[in-house]
Amino acid sequence: MLQEERHNFIVQKINSHNKVVASELCQQLGVSLDTIRRDIKELEKKGKVIKVHGGAVSPNFHQPFQQLEVYAKHEKKEIAKKALTIIKDGMTLLTGGGTVMVELARILPEHLTGTLFTVSPLVALEAAQRSSVEVVLIGGRLARNSYICTGTSVASAIAEIQVDLCLLGTNGLSIKEGITDFDWEVSQVKKALIKAAAKTALLSISEKLGIVQKVQVCRLEAIDYLVTELEPDDDKLSQYRNICKVL
Amino acid sequence: MLQEERHNFIVQKINSHNKVVASELCQQLGVSLDTIRRDIKELEKKGKVIKVHGGAVSPNFHQPFQQLEVYAKHEKKEIAKKALTIIKDGMTLLTGGGTVMVELARILPEHLTGTLFTVSPLVALEAAQRSSVEVVLIGGRLARNSYICTGTSVASAIAEIQVDLCLLGTNGLSIKEGITDFDWEVSQVKKALIKAAAKTALLSISEKLGIVQKVQVCRLEAIDYLVTELEPDDDKLSQYRNICKVL
DNA sequence: TTTCTCTGTGCACGTTCTTGCCGCTTTGGA
DNA sequence: TCCAAAGCGGCAAGAACGTGCACAGAGAAA
């Protein structure tokens, strides 16, 4: 294996995936990690890649919003990890937006297959970048505060699909009022998302428990899984356990 | 074994395998390593191969990766600034994807009104964040390497709209072959974009001038404005000035 | 035919490049 | 705060390189 070949391989891979992981490369190319590191160093000197901890990324593709300030990042990562356990290979998924969903998209396994429908451009980009699922972005008017696509075109597009699992975040959930949101348009989109899915998982940090917002999305009975950062047997979740599977 | 024979053998092998390893060649041809080295040296002088440590690689195979530009960020910003001059308040815009377009979205005036349709999630997010234009994201399957939405849903969605100005990037443009791209799906999307717009502006760094890719998007006549980082009266653009407005 | 020259080839030698390994430091997640 | 993974610099073995030199064979000239 010529050095040149390796360099081409790496650049090519970066062009299509926007990133490479050093440890994977050394397996794929059958050379030591040190050699890969040196390759990446060389390529960086030539400006073809940008070296990062663990590998390299494309110099052309810069992700905006990466430094997006995430509130309660740790908790949200925890939730995303748990949610991953109900995602199986080959599933058709449908997601809303929000920071929890972006965290989930970030940790999707690279080899995951299936299709991911989403109304969130951020989720779409992250998912496409990290994993090999087919990503379909449902288009529409971009809502400014939530950064998800809304409007009639979204509703009609969602009406045409049928998926295995819908993954949703929320701004409020309570036993009595169910899932609630403060934005009417967003709530309409969420209604449509739930309707299109066989099962629905709600991903929410525990501080939203008991919060009621202006607009109702659905009753709790419409939810199959509730994923929070708490232990499933936490007292705060006791009432919810009767209605949906808590994890 | 004549020198000539060896040279032919090497060129042939490089054309089919894109590389040769010197140590292998000296076994296959039954000559010493030194001879092979001298052969490769000669062939490099003639431009038939590119010598690398351990052997040689094809000059055709090698080139595409070299043209991967990095310093272009400044040029792209320059292009975006120029493109801004043809964007007026209240316009309905339609854009493709690519780094130039993202730069443009980043510098959209905050008070700009109008509607921006786009197939690029990145452009949509940047535009929505920076300016007050209404952003409509045209959804579809997210193409992994170009990060734009593609597929039939895009085509049909675009077919339903009519806009004032289409802003496009490209991977190649030449007088004879017009606008060309290396991805068939992307080229189809671009065709649809152009069709939906009253006027089309092409934003491209000068490196792409004279470059021809696999798939044709349209002829140069379909373009109204050509925006590069060069001065409009630059020699390289002389032929283009007859066909479209260059700025 | 003999001799000379020129080119192509192989060999030897010292130099440079590449690569894997080792120990130590840094980084980032738990 | 701790720990595993990643990064870094240096080292050494081996591969590849360049150069000079010798030799052989072909063709030209004597």
Image (spheres, coloured by chain):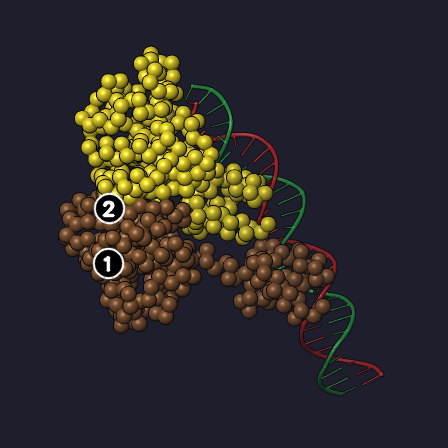
Chain colours: A yellow, B brown, C red, D green
- Gap between marks 1 and 2 measured at Cα: 15 Å
* Residue for point 48% across, 40% down: A21
Residue matched to label 2: B136
The front one of B62 and A112 is: A112
Residue matched to label 1: B197
* Residue for point 20% across, 27% down: A215
The front one of B23 and B133 is: B133
Q: Amino acid at mark 1?
A: Ala
Residue A191 in sight in this render: yes
Residue B81 location (% of width, % of height): 23, 55
Under circle 1, the secondary element is strand
Which image quadrant for residue A81?
top left
Under circle 2, the secondary element is strand
Q: Chain of mark 2?
A: B
The front one of B55 and B244 is: B244
* Residue for point 40% across, 46% down: B144
Q: Is residue A27 left or right of residue C2?
A: left
